[in-house]
Image (cartoon, rainbow, N blue to C red):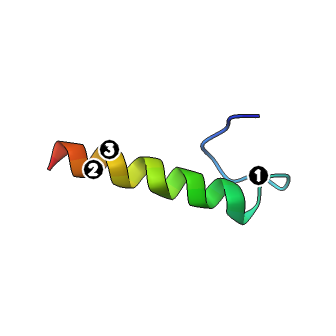
Amino acid sequence: QNSLYPTSDGGLGTWSLSTVYVGLIIGSLL
């Protein structure tokens, strides 16, 4: 699953990926 939201299966790993993606998006906007 390529979900960007944390799930019971993904856990902190999914959180890390979502944080990286959000960081890149915010960085590109700024």
Between the C-alphas of marks 1 and 2, the distance is 23 Å
- Marks 3 & 1, CB-CB < 8 Å contact: no
Residue drawn at point x = 36 percent, y = 55 percent: 23
Question: Mark 2 and mark 3: span between their CA atoms?
Answer: 4 Å
Res 26 label: 2
Horizontal and vertical percent position of residue 18: 54, 51
Distance in Å between CA atoms under marks 3 and 1:
21 Å
Label 3 sits on a secondary structure element that is helix
Q: Is residue 29 left or right of residue 16?
A: left
SS for tag 1?
A: loop
Sequence-earlier tag: 3 or 1: 1
* Circle 2 SS class: helix
Residue 14 spot, x, y in % from top left: 67, 53
- Disc 1: CA contacts within 10 A as few (<14), some (14-19) or many (>=20): few
Disc marking residue 7? 1
Q: Earlier in the sequence, mark 1 or mark 2?
A: 1
- Identified by mark 2, the residue type is Ile
Q: Residue at x 24, y 51 (%)?
A: 27
Question: Which amino acid type is shown beneath numbered disc 3?
Answer: Ile
Q: Is residue 3 above or below residue 20?
A: above
Q: Residue at x 45, y 47 (%)?
A: 21
Mark 3 closeness class: few <14, some 14–19, many ≥20 residues within 10 Å: few
Q: Which circle, 1 or 2, is nearer the viewer?
A: 2
